Amino acid sequence: MTDNDDLLFEDEAPEAPRPSIAPAGWKMLVVDDEPEVHSITRLVLADFAFKGRTTQFFSAYSAADAIAILERERDIAVILLDVVMETDDAGLKLVHHIREVMGNRHVRIILRTGQPGQAPERSVILEYDINDYKAKTQLTAQQLFTCTVAALRSYEDLITIDANRRGLEKIIEASSSLSKTRSMKLFAAGVLTQLSVIVGAGPDAILCVKRGDVRRRDRNGLYVLAGSGRFESLINEPLAAVVEAGVVTTVSDCLNQRRNVFGEDHCALYIQTLTDRENVVYMSSNRPLNQLDQRLIALFCDKIAIGFENIYLYEQLLKAQEATVATLADIAETAQVDIDIATAASLETRSESLRIAGLAERIARTLHAGRQFRDIIDQSFLELIGLASMLHDVGNITVSDHILRKPGPLTGDERRIMQRHTVRGHALLVRACGMVQGLTYLELGAEIALAHHENFDGSGYPHGLAGKAIPLAARIAAVADSFDALVSERPYRPAIARDQAVTMIEAMAGSRFDPVVVAAFLEVQAAGSGA
């Protein structure tokens, strides 16, 4: 064949089909029951290249063969398909199978037939999802070249659109997943995971936070916030002290330029929040990231910049809440004490409050891990129980100091006054609850303040509640408060040894305390985290 305009399928000498070769390039499937058609197609397109990519041919001699190849090779770009093979409409049935059964909407299908009368062009184009229709007797080499280029261009556009769609879906999914995270460290680790998914890069990645003065652009202020792969163990370390100089240089360049930096096998991503806090993600990659990857990354970084800001503000709010509650607990414990004594005692009082909060939270998390009280202990409960427990004795602010700090036993009247701190503390916190909506540490604190002196057997105060009638938060706080009281010095007795205090708590399971909560407390102590 010397002239590209010669007809391809008219008076051609039959030729045995050649074996398929597999260079990197566009994948094309020839489906025809005539071997010479395969040979001529390969011959005409032997030197074909489009956008620097050559062609890899696959041959099928029946619809069944084609289906098997398509199920194996998911990225075939173009199918040159005969209509009449094992049956008069085998090709048309194959089109339906590809589109409707296999759900393959990307592959471009060029229908070729030697008997156009059996499959009229207009009805075929209208009724079947094909991309071109050619009669073999009219198809020239130039026409084959032209329709192949058009088909590949269309295929590439569809793949790009689909990649964009899937990339955006990943970003939306990642943003939704990350928005549920309230810990900066977990958020940072999630950012690395989601970026790896979006661009298929990694696994070595590191997220750095700039803790120095943003305006002075202090390079020495870079610390590792999260890491994966070979960087996984470097959290909270100064960047320059734990990674190679090349990574530090790339991260510094990214900060100095205030933009993303892309290399052949890595990238550095610049993330700046609305309040000018700066973060950089460094990721290794086994391939250069293309323009689509880079655009998706830029979009994702814009989205998570807001997330970093929200997490930061959330953590600051939590710290403010904790400081406020700790101060309130201080006031409750040091009420009406001379200012010098109060100042000296405040550190010990705050330490006590934080110990009780920490122990209550660990007991709750142990119960949650053991799938106990699943209808009560959820993520909000776990997040609030520590702060709420610090408010257990807030009612002490209403009790006279001579009763609070009396070194000897209380009289009957003094004991009744003392017991009223539960009701008064509850009233104070309920009043505060009215200023906010939803479950807060104030609401949980009100339950604890009222009921942390109720006994599991019904012998406690102020209402003589028993068993499950006592709110779970109060049952947990009661164990944490009693244990801390036992191991702390009091005006009327010295501190008790820790082992002895654990034994005493265990002995009161079923009478003073909920046995299930005590079991969780013992598990915490056995794990060495009850301090």
Image (cartoon, helix red, strand yellow):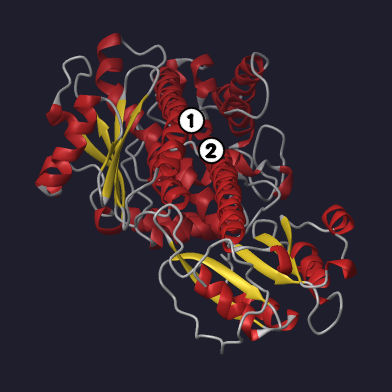
Name the residue: 26% across, 46% down.
235
Instruction: Check if mark 1's residue and mark 2's residue have beta carbons within 8 Å.
Output: yes
* Looking at the image, residue 157 lies above or below residue 204: above
Establish if 281 lies above or below 92: above
Residue at (62%, 54%) from the top-left corner?
Answer: 511
> Where residue 12 appears, x then y in whole percent?
62, 80
Disc 1 crowd, CA 10 A, few/some/many (<14, 14-19, 20+): some
Q: Position of residue 265 (x, y in %)?
A: 26, 52
Residue 220 lies in what quarter of the image?
Answer: top left
Mark number for residue 175? 2
Residue 382 locus on image (x, y percent): 54, 42
Alpha-carbon distance for marks 1 and 2?
A: 7 Å
Report whether 452 appears left or right of 206. Answer: right
Instruction: Please tell me in which quadrant of the rendered image residue 170 appears.
Output: top right
Quadrant of the image occupied by residue 65: bottom right
| Residue type at tag 2 | Ser
Q: Compared with residue 237, is residue 418 higher up or lower down, i.e. above or below?
A: above
**Residue nearer the viewer, 217 or 389:** 217
Relative placement, left or right, of 127 versus 361 is right
Instruction: Point out the residue furthest to the bottom here.
Output: 16
Q: Secondary structure at mark 2?
A: helix
Q: Which residue is mark 1?
A: 303
Q: Dot 1: what SS?
A: helix
Q: Nearer the viewer, residue 438 or 144?
A: 144
Q: Earlier in the sequence, mark 1 or mark 2?
A: 2
| The one of 118 and 247 positioned closer to us in this rendering | 118
Q: Can the viewer see residue 238 in this picture?
A: no
Disc 2: CA contacts within 10 A as few (<14), some (14-19) or many (>=20)? some
* Residue 19 seen from this side: yes
